[in-house]
Image (tube, coloured by chain):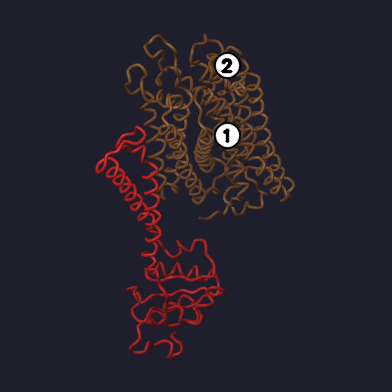
Chain colours: A red, B brown
Amino acid sequence: MNDHSPQDTQPRREERVFGVACSFRSVAEIFHAAERIRDAGWKKWDVYTPFPIHGMDAAMGLPRSSIPRVTLLAGITGFVTGCLLTWYTNSFDYPLIVGAKPYWSVIYPFPVLYECTILFAAFGTFFGQFIFNRLPRHHHPLFDVPQFIRVSDDAFMVVLEVTDPHFGNPDKAYDFLASLGGQDITLVRD
Amino acid sequence: MSDSRSPSAWSARWPLLAAIAAVCIGTVYGFAFFTPLEEGARNQMSLLYGAMFWASVLIGVLMLTMITRLFDAGWAPIIRRSWEFLLPALPIVILLGVAPLAFNPSVRHAVWEWTSATDHAAHAKSWFLNEPFLLGRIGFYIVAFGGLGWALRHWSFRQDGDRTAGHTHTLHAISAAGVPVAALTLTFLAFDCLMALSYHWFSTMYGVWFFTLSIRMALSVTVILTHLLSTRGWLGGMLNQAHRHVLGCLMLAFTVFWAYISFSQYFIIYNANIPEETFWYNIREIDAVTGEKSQWWWVSMFMVFGFFLLPFILLLFYRTKIIASRIVAVASLIFVGGLVDLWWNAIPRKIHDHSEVGFHVNDFLVPQLGLDLLAVLGFGALVFAIFLRTVRNAECIPVHDPRISESLEYHE
């Protein structure tokens, strides 16, 4: 079953392993491979394709992004901050009547409140995705895999990551990918 | 597809709806034209109210039809065909609901106070607010909306038969020219039939407010109608989760836009604090004689919390937009909110009396609310009778639209 070249299969002693990569030749192949990896219970793995594949989210069993929750919390924080800002400056610290309006109400400072809401929500979304995506990141172990460059052209690649409890040892992951029909199975060094 | 779900089976039911429409609109006509005229013309307002409500739905449908053409929206074709079936009702609703009030001189004077006013405001605005020009404008609204709707249907329906992709380009051009025409027409319709009911008052936001209301109403009707057509009609197996998602996103966007426009109008008037503008909001909040909160105050609060905040919060959630029962529930809430928004805009008026301030404001809760709802039911039955009649004239989805497969396989 395991007929790969030995220098590629075994990590050298001091090396850390990122995972195991393999290629598929068509959308259908990688789609069905993704479904089987999902059904086997894998969580730490990813699919790399030259173009978006409709339905791949479901085939991989990906949940929806948590970013909207960050956006909502940040937006509420912004609204409350705007309320506190206008109340503190105009009604508490230096009470001032402008244009015969109350010291504070929810109406006259509404542009401030909703601008703060939008500003904070936008920052929350932007920086939230940085954190969730672990950015900035200047290098990735896959950049050292020679065939990875072809996923921007005509290759479809699956990478099983070592952090997944199913990973065990590289040989087990090799066998699993080979049973899915993956080709060019390669160890990815961290 | 079982036979009862086919377009022809649905279409056969149009006489029933036409009969309901005839009974309801006939009753509303009876109250409008055969009861004594009073200041405020509350009986006559029911006819205007019902017609303007469905005019707003259909104007939204007209705008969505053109906007989805202009943006080449890939999701739209299967839904747009239902909009095209609705379009012929628009000129008929204005013809049956607005024109009779305007062309009957005594009713016209009761509904549009400016026609018999002699004060400076009426004089200064008389270059626009004069009776021959009003009648001419109403004729123009009917012709402009009718013509646009006809053109949008004509080339779209012809594509079913001759399979010419070029008709899509023709419809592109019609929509590009039609959007500004329809925008101006709907703005002046809102000025004439709603804003001019209080002719002292003016708001430059009013046309945009009516546009946002129209789109919200059209989207809510679209969500409910397409859900019915997918569970009991010819869209079964075609309408998918992604279509609901895109309609839900549009509902969310226009809920925010409606709030933005409505609040901006309030905020500008609140900040300037000029009596000739603020009275319009005052009569919608407080009892002029006692200074207490009036019934309209609670209607206003429903607008803020029920027509904006609740739909806004609900539509933020992804699952609200994709689960059919939830998006239909939100669409129903927005539909009811639209009824209330139109009441709030059209009905409150100063009625002169002998109190110390010289007037009172007509209440929200009056028996004529039932007449208003009868008018809404009547014109709704009329609109869908015309819809079912028009279904016979074309395929139930645009089978030769260049984007039909993209629409059928639409994916988030």
Compared to B201, does A15 lie above or below?
A: below
Task: Give A118 or B298, whichever is nearer the viewer.
Answer: A118
Within 10 Å of disc 2 (Cα), the crowding (few <14, some 14-19, many 20+) is some
Give percent across and percent down for residue A88: 27, 44
Front label number (2 vs 1): 2
Q: Left of B129 or right of it: where is B360?
A: left
Q: Residue at x 34, y 73 (%)?
A: A164
In the rendered image, the residue lying farthest to the left is: A92
Q: Which chain does the numbered disc 1 sit on?
A: B
Label 2: element kind: helix
Q: Is residue B348 above or below residue B214?
A: above
Image x and y of residue B277, in percent: 45, 27
Q: Is residue B145 left or right of residue B212?
A: right
Q: Of helix, strand and loop, which one carries label 1?
A: helix
Point out residue B190 in the picture as x, y percentages from the top left corner: 55, 29
Are marks 2 and 1 in one subunit? yes
Q: Chain of mark 2?
A: B
Q: Is residue B118 visible?
A: yes
Pick the front one: B390 or B292: B292
Q: Residue at x 42, y 45 (%)?
A: B315
Task: Report x, y in % for residue A62.
Answer: 41, 62
Residue type pointed to by label 1: Leu
Left or right: B199 in relation to B300: right
Number of residues whose C-alpha sits closer than 10 Å to that of mark 1, classed few (under 14), some (14–19) or many (20 or more)? many
Q: Nearer the viewer, residue A123 or A23?
A: A123
From the image, tell me which residue sits under label 1: B58
The residue wearing badge 2 is B115
For the N terminus of chain B, give its image quadrant: top right
Sooner in the amino-acid sequence: mark 2 or mark 1 = 1
Q: Which mark is residue A180?
A: none
Residue B332: tell me if it is visible: no
